[in-house]
Image (cartoon, rainbow, N blue to C red):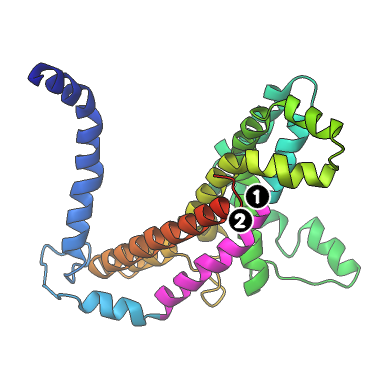
Amino acid sequence: MMKKNGTGWLFASPYLLYGIIFFAVPLIWSLYLSMTDWNLISPVYNFKGIDNFIEAVKHPGVQAAFFVTFKFMAAFVPMVIVSSTLVALVIHGLPKFKGLFLIGFFLPYLASGVVSSLIVKGLLSQNSALNVFLRGIGIDIDWLSTPLSALLVVAAIIAWKFTGYYALILTAGFESISKDVYEAAAIDGVSSSQRFWKITLPLLYPALFTVLILSIGVSFGIFTEVYQLTGGGPNYATNTWQMEIFKQAFTNLSAGYASAVAIIASIVTFAAILIIRKLLEIWGKRNGWV
């Protein structure tokens, strides 16, 4: 018995070491830093207790990050769910070369966020062909300097990036649904809308549930696109948790305070995903899909 346990621990040791080195140790260190006034440079650590947490809760940047995350979620999640579902439906209906098309849609997920953000920034600049055309027809929009449009632009970029990835999951869900079920429903005279609500959606629910949770998780981790396009502005309109942590740690050199913000962000992220996941599970059980 001891030999079997030892073999199990041996095979699990690489993951355990990885978790200790890259998760447990940084977490403990961050908890310690969050109660100090370390400025990222000085070797002196002055203990502040929970003062950093109290200051963070009152800070407009942290308050903005909290609300911006949910605003971004409200824009991003519907965008990416609709786009990935449409792509999955189209690919599922193809007679051949499904894998080739899936790879094509998956490629944006592998693209650099910095590069795609710089391209979009150029496309939306005041002298771009798009804005020149829009001004010619009487529409003048400063895409990245208007709070609503800036948030939607960031949401659209990330939705474009993740559409292929989520479509891959949803396509697998569509492929797992037996055609015999649809044939039997057609014989019984079930309409197309009823087939969608009574057959497709319940059987697709596991894949759709996975995509929903993944997309909600992404909403709490936005940084690259915001940093490149808006820097968290205008007026905190796109100030995400990661953007606030970055500014406090590397711009203001308040690493202790930034650690407190990071811990608050982690708690909010974990709690929000847990609550939303439970609500989705309750919804699925109520409809008999789980």
179 is within the stretch colored magenta: no
Residue type for callout 2: Val
Residue stretch in magenta: 60-81
* Residue at x 66% of width, y 33% of height: 171
Q: Is the residue marked by circle 1 packed among few (<14), some (14-19), or many (20+) residues within 10 Å?
A: many
Q: Is residue 262 above or below residue 147?
A: above
- Number of residues whose C-alpha sits closer than 10 Å to that of mark 2, classed few (under 14), some (14–19) or many (20 or more): many
- Residue 232, can we see it? no
Residue displayed at 20% across by 47% down: 24
- The residue that label 1 is drawn on is 81
Residue 63 within the magenta-colored segment of the rendering: yes
Front residue of this view, candidates 101 and 232: 101
User: CB under 8 Å between callouts 2 and 1?
Assistant: yes
Asked which quadrant contains residue 48, the reply is bottom left
Marks 2 and 1, how far apart at CA: 6 Å
Mark 2 element type: helix
Q: Where residue 248 sits in the image (x, y, percent)? A: 34, 68
Q: Which amino acid type is shown beneath numbered disc 1? A: Ile
Question: Which residue occupies the foreground of this view, 172 or 255?
Answer: 172
- Residue at numbered disc 2: 77
